[in-house]
Each structure stands twice: as structure tokens, then as C-alpha cells.
Image (cartoon, helix red, strand yellow):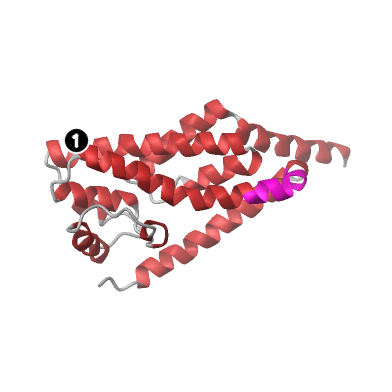
Amino acid sequence: MPALFAEATMRGERIQAVARDERLTRRAAFAWGFAEGLFFFIVPDVYVSFAALFSLRAGAVAWAASIAGSLAAVCVIYLLAGILALDYRSFLEHIPGISAGMLAAVDRTLRAGLPYDLWLITGGIPLKVYAGVALSQGTGLAALLIWTVFARVVRIAPTYALVAAVRLVCRRSIDARPRFWFGLLVVVWVAFYTFYFVAMNRRVWI
């Protein structure tokens, strides 16, 4: 029993160490932001929430690094769609949660310009869809990069704020039972994405 308790404690300490490692956080969050901004279908909020749950500073570092990764992804999309003239927009339809109807809806929305509003939080449309469609309409790279920073701040702010509040209120419990809180975070995100993909598959785009 003492050996099992010691092993569990070490695992908990390992979770905290990984979450609070800012060097690792910068690399992982940048890579996640880049991948999600280009082809991946799980938002970097997941990693930001993990880091922030155990360290608000590490969470902020992850947030900033994920934005940098997203900006790099936009540059790659611009290279692929704007310079090399590859059909990135069609590629988007093969990503889970993205449909032709969603692309058409975004196409109509962007005819009035890139959206600087809170709909970005609740709309459920991946930011790479906006980037791909905007570039297909001839939007310049500079304008899209500025919008990407705004969009990432608006999108991730609620996640960071919620997890930060939990951290501030439950800090002692989180530090004492890191495995439990990590498991709870995993369950929350699995539930969220189960609901999200079901909702996106059923949604009728007008």
C-alpha cells in the first residue's frame, strides 16, 4: 500500500510538473495552435485549460504561444491558397465538424468583412474556416493576421477565465489531488466535444 500511494503521488506530481513547465508549455501550445489553425480539429483551449488549472502563469504562456502558432498557420494557409493556388477550401470539408454548408455560410458572412464580434465565441465555426474562406475571397494576409489575434483572444478568454476562477477557488484541492482534477478536466472536454460534433452534424446552415 505505501508503495502504491507513493506511485500515485509521483504521478500527481508529474502532472503538475508538466503543466507548470513553461518551456514545454510554449512548445506544446505553439504546436497545438499551429496544428489546429491548419488541420487539427481540437482547439488549443484544451491545453491552455490544462496549464492554467495548475498554474495561471503557465496558462497565460500557453495562451500566448497558441496565438503565435495560429498566426504561423495562417501564414502557411496564405502560402498554400494564395501563392501556390492549392484548393485549401475543399480540403477543409474533410476535417471533422466542417461541412460544405458551414463553408457556404462563412462565405456569405465574410462578404461583409471579417467579423469582429462575440459571435466568434458561440458560433462553433473553427477559425481556419474563416481563414480559408477569407483568403479565397482575396483578403490580405495582414488583415487576416490582425483578425486572428483578435479571434484567438476572444475565443480563449472565456476558457482561461473559467479555469482561472476554478484555480483561485479550489487551489488547495487542485494541488493536493492533481490526478482527480486532471481526470475531471479530461471528462469535461470529452463531454464538450461529444456534444459539439453531434451538434455540428445536425446543424442546418442557412
Residue 201 picture quarter:
bottom left
Front-lying residue, 41 or 151: 151
Question: Looking at the picture, how far across and down is residue 200, in whole percent?
Answer: 37, 66
* Circle 1: element type: helix
Q: Which residue is mark 1?
A: 79
Position of residue 95 in the picture relative to residue 3 (left or right): left
Q: Residue at x 50, y 36 (%)?
A: 62
Quarter of the C terminus within the rendering: bottom left
Q: Residue at x 54, y 58 (%)?
A: 190
Quarter of the N terminus within the rendering: top right
Front-lying residue, 179 or 79: 79
Residue 71 picture quarter:
top left
Task: Give the main secondary structure, helix, strand or loop, of the magenta stretch.
Answer: helix
Q: Residue at x 46, y 36 (%)?
A: 64
Write down the region rendered in magenta: 165-174
Question: Looking at the picture, how far across and down is residue 43, in whole percent?
Answer: 43, 49
Number of marks in the rendered image: 1
Position of residue 128 in the picture relative to residue 195 (left or right): left
Position of residue 66 in the picture relative to residue 130 (left or right): right
Q: Is residue 161 visible?
A: yes
Q: Amino acid at mark 1?
A: Leu
Position of residue 24 in the picture relative to residue 125 (left or right): right
Front-lying residue, 115 or 17: 115
The answer to if 71 sits in the magenta stretch is: no
Looking at the image, residue 58 lies above or below residue 99: above
Looking at the image, residue 151 lies above or below residue 73: below
Q: Residue at x 25, y 43 (%)?
A: 144
Question: Looking at the picture, how far across and down is residue 15, in whole percent?
Answer: 66, 38
